[in-house]
Every structure is written in structure tokens, then in C-alpha cells.
Image: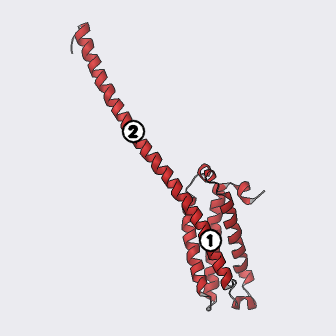
Amino acid sequence: MDPITAVGLVASVAQLADLVLRVITNLHNYYRDFEAAPRCSAQLRAELKRLFLVVSDLEELSEAKLRRFSIEAELKEMVELLQEMLSRITPRHTRGLKRLQWPFREAENKEFLGRIERLKSSFIIILNIAQTYLLKAFFLLTSLSHAIQEIHGDLSTVQGQTTEWCRQTLCFPTI
């Protein structure tokens, strides 16, 4: 069973947020210790920080909403990508001579950037669609509220007219 199905989508998004933070932290520590880190590493860290913000927004969506968007494949791919990155930048892999070498070749940096940007874009599209649904629901509720207020006003008018008719027709004394 894949990790997404076993844990559930909301838990997977939370796991993804944690994984992004761990990659950012380890990448930052590695970068700090390695003065000759390529320019792409700064881009990679910046993109991961932006990814974290998007994933944090995804955490706000319910499991039902996440399932509606069939996000499992993207979450699984992102988890695998981050786990691959994390495995190469954890402290146990950055000791000795390996510490003097950046863990990703420039081509790998570019590949990671491209995959992260593509998946992040998918997540952003999902967030935009979810926001659109929320706005539609808000406008629908607002319209419904106005309709209820109109009905309430109409009922008050009918009640007043009915009371007046009863007084005049049935000769009820007015108090």
C-alpha cells in the first residue's frame, strides 16, 4: 500500500510540510558549511520555501476536498522527490570528503527545481480551484440569506394583513 493511501491525504499533506521543512533545514546547514555551493542551491532553497507556503495552505483543505482533486499522485511524487533529496543531504552523508562536495550536480539542481515548480504549480491550481468553490459557496449563501430576509419580510407583511383582515372581518376588538 502506498504511503498516501495508508495515512490519508490530510496526514500526507502534513507529512509533506514536515518533509519540506527538513529538506530546507538540511540544505541550509549544508549550504552554510559549504562555501562554494552552486548558485542553483540558493534557488533550490528559495523554491522549497515557496513550496512550504503552498503546502501549508493545502493543509487547510479537508480530506474530502483533497480527494475531489485527485491529488494523491502529486503528493506521492513530491514525497519521493523530497525523500531522495533528504537522503543526500542528511548529516551522515555530509561527513568527511563528501562534505567538500555539493550533493547535487548542476543538472540535478535544475531537474529538482523543475519538478518542484511543476508540482507546486499543480498544488497552486488546486488551491485556486478550492478558493473558487469557497467563493461560489459564499455568494450562494449570501444570495440565500437575502432570499430568506425577503421571505421573512413578505411573511411579516402577510401576517400584518391577515391580522388586519381578521380584525375587520371577524370584529375582534383592537387592544
Question: Along the polypeptide, which appears first: circle 2 or circle 1?
Answer: 1
For label 2, the crowd category at 10 Å Cα-Cα, with few meaning under 14, some 14 to 19 and many 20 or more, is few
Give the image location of residue 164, x and y in percent.
24, 16
For image coordinates 35% across by 35% down, the residue present is 149
For image coordinates 55% across by 60% down, the residue present is 125
Q: Nearer the viewer, mark 2 or mark 1?
A: 1
Give the image location of residue 10, x and y in percent.
63, 56
Kind of residue sitting beneath label 1: Ile
Q: Is residue 34 above or below residue 155?
A: below
Position of 151 with respect to 30 (left or right) is: left
Is residue 30 or residue 76 the one in the foreground? 76
Tell me the element at label 2: helix
Count of picture labels: 2
Q: Is residue 21 above or below residue 164?
A: below
Q: Would residue 125 be seen by someone viewing this image from the given angle?
A: yes
* Residue corresponding to mark 2: 145
Give the image location of residue 118, x and y in percent.
61, 68
Residue 59: quarter of image = bottom right
Extreme-top residue of the structure: 170
Q: Would residue 55 be seen by someone viewing this image from the given angle?
A: no
For image coordinates 57% across by 80% down, the residue present is 43
For label 1, the crowd category at 10 Å Cα-Cα, with few meaning under 14, some 14 to 19 and many 20 or more, is many
Q: Are marks 2 and 1 in contact (CB under 8 Å)?
A: no
Is residue 150 or residue 97 the one in the foreground? 150
* Residue corresponding to mark 1: 116
Which quarter of the rendering shows the C terminus? top left
Kind of residue sitting beneath label 2: Ser
Give the image location of residue 56, x and y in percent.
56, 63
Which quarter of the rendering shows the N terminus? bottom right
Q: CA distance from mark 2 to mark 1?
A: 43 Å
Is residue 171 or residue 92 the one in the foreground? 171
